[in-house]
Image (cartoon, rainbow, N blue to C red):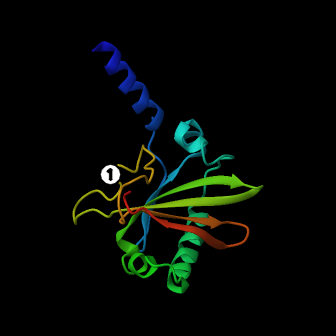
Amino acid sequence: MKKTILILAVVVAQVASAEDFPIVDTPDYKGAIVPAGDAARDSRLAKSYGGFWTPTPEQVAKAEARIATFLEASTEKYAPRERKKLKWFRRQYLGYTKDGEKRILCNFLPGVKEGQDPFEGLRRSLVLLYDRGPDYWKIDYRLEKDECEGFHVDLGY
């Protein structure tokens, strides 16, 4: 019994941060910026991403503007649905480097009910999108090229 409890505590410690993530709170979007140090400590991320860095609120704003444009022009099946509900989604932003280029992974998560804290669950833990359903999706913003790619809606299977 003691062994099981110890293992669970180690898993939670790997995922949770000791401090709140920086918050972005605008009329059009609300989210948390995952600090590079927290991203680097997450063993799940290391499988797909590397070269972590911390995006600034200004870089996040550029990503958000391009995401809206991308969704309006996209012919992807779920793009119209996500564009229509764009303000409703909460976000987490993660800076990483791929092929020497800075990118921001933008994870979109379901909104909350009126009166609830929109940052609940985002402040100290990275939320990964695996088998959660279509209200969870992601897109990559390429900072130097000012473009989006990798739009993916998690269909829950």
Please identify the quarter of the rendering in which residue 125 is found. top left
Q: Is residue 104 left or right of residue 107?
A: right
Q: Is residue 42 visible?
A: no
Residue, x 32% and y 20% (percent of image)?
5
Number of marks present in the image shown = 1
User: Residue 152 location, x and y as percent?
Assistant: 50, 66
Q: Is residue 48 left or right of residue 136?
A: right
Residue, x 45% and y 47% (percent of image)?
126
User: Residue 85 location, x and y as percent?
Assistant: 36, 76
Residue, x 38% and y 54% (percent of image)?
131
Nearest the viewer among 2 and 106 is: 2
Quarter the N terminus occupies = top left
Q: Is residue 102 above or below residue 68?
A: above
In this view, which residue lies farthest toward the front? 157
Q: Is residue 67 above or below residue 90?
A: below
Residue, x 69% and y 53% (percent of image)?
97
Q: Is residue 104 above or below residue 26?
A: above
Nearest the viewer among 127 and 55 is: 127
In this view, which residue lies farthest toward the right? 100
Q: Secondary structure at mark 1?
A: loop
User: Residue 149 location, x and y as percent?
Assistant: 61, 70
Report the residue marked by disc 1.
Answer: 120
User: Residue 133 location, x and y as percent?
Assistant: 35, 61
Disc 1 residue type (three-letter): Glu
Q: Is residue 133 left or right of residue 143?
A: left
Please identify the quarter of the rendering in which residue 103 is found. bottom right
